[in-house]
Image (cartoon, rainbow, N blue to C red):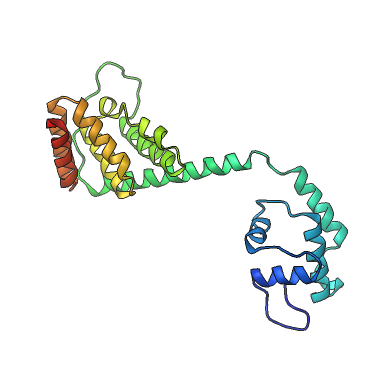
């Protein structure tokens, strides 16, 4: 949009000021952004002021849509609006965090030599425990970044029993890379306190192989403390 008689395009704050002159005061840039990104259906008064300002600026023939058509489009948008969108947006945030975790773990595995994984015993349902480790990282990080801290930490409780020392080491290092130090510290504490000496040594060696000397030392201290 441009001011009448001027050639400069308007910025967000300018548009708010222009709409105030057209009879719709108090529109802030965040609201304009939500309308533009289809996060909210704008009120009818806003659309009337917007159309009036556009006509005053460009002329009726150059606007490209009548006021009636604009109001009809608003009604269609209201009918197709999604009451569950906020929930979907939250899930999308979790999925994005999970994807970041998967990328981090993939980068970690690609930069280090493969670590030995002991053969599974007992339950053999074709589950890929490498995939399980990646899922653990992504889900825990996703929960943490959406404020569900207790739920995120709870996901780690069975990791020492379900995954090998090498896979736990990969998870710890991935948590560190993503800045989720509480998750890394919790997994170290659980593993060091609950697992037998052989597994503790396995985790320590795996962390050293990954360059995580500080975490390797922390595991040993937790085990003997």
42 or 166, nearer to the observer: 42
The quarter of the rendered structure image containing the N terminus is: bottom right
- The image quarter in which residue 187 lies: top left
154 or 173, nearer to the observer: 154
x and y, in percent, of residue 36 in the image: 67, 59
x and y, in percent, of residue 13 in the image: 65, 70
Number of numbered markers: 0
Q: Is residue 14 left or right of residue 163?
A: right
Q: Name above or below for residue 206 compared with residue 1.
A: above
Q: Name above or below for residue 56 compared with residue 199.
A: below
Residue most extreme to the top:
122
The quarter of the rendered structure image containing the C terminus is: top left
- The image quarter in which residue 129 lies: top left
Q: Mark yes or no: residue 118 visible.
A: no
Q: Mark yes or no: residue 140 visible.
A: yes
Question: Which residue sits at x=60%, y=42%?
Answer: 86
Q: Is residue 102 left or right of residue 73?
A: left
Q: Name above or below for residue 164 compared with residue 169.
A: above
Question: Which residue sits at x=32%, y=39%?
Answer: 183
x and y, in percent, of residue 70 in the image: 82, 58
Question: Which residue sits at x=45%, y=41%?
Answer: 147
Q: Name above or below for residue 14 compared with residue 136.
A: below
x and y, in percent, of residue 109 in the image: 27, 44
Q: Is residue 222 left or right of residue 174?
A: left
Question: Which residue sits at x=17%, y=37%?
Answer: 219
């Amino acid at each position: 949009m441009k001011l009448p008689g001027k050639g400069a395009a308007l910025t967000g704050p300018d548009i708010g000021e222009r709409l105030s002159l057209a009879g719709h005061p108090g529109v802030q840039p965040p609201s304009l952004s939500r309308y533009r990104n289809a996060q909210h259906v704008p009120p009818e008064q806003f659309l009337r002021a917007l159309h009036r300002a556009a006509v005053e600026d460009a002329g009726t023939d150059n606007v490209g849509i009548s006021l009636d058509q604009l109001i009809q489009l608003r009604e269609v948008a209201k009918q197709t609006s999604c009451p569950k969108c906020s929930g979907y947006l939250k899930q999308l945030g979790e999925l994005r965090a999970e994807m970041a975790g998967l990328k981090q773990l993939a980068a970690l595995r690609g930069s280090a030599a493969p670590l030995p994984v002991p053969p599974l015993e007992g339950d053999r349902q074709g589950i890929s425990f490498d995939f399980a480790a990646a899922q653990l990282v992504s889900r825990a990080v996703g929960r943490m970044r959406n404020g569900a801290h207790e739920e995120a930490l709870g996901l780690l409780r069975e990791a020492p029993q379900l995954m090998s020392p090498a896979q736990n080491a990969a998870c710890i290092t991935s948590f560190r890379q993503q800045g989720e130090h509480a998750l890394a510290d919790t997994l170290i504490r659980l593993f060091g306190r609950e697992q037998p000496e052989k597994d503790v040594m396995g985790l320590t060696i795996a962390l050293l192989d990954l360059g995580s000397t500080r975490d390797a030392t922390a595991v040993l201290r937790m085990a003997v403390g």
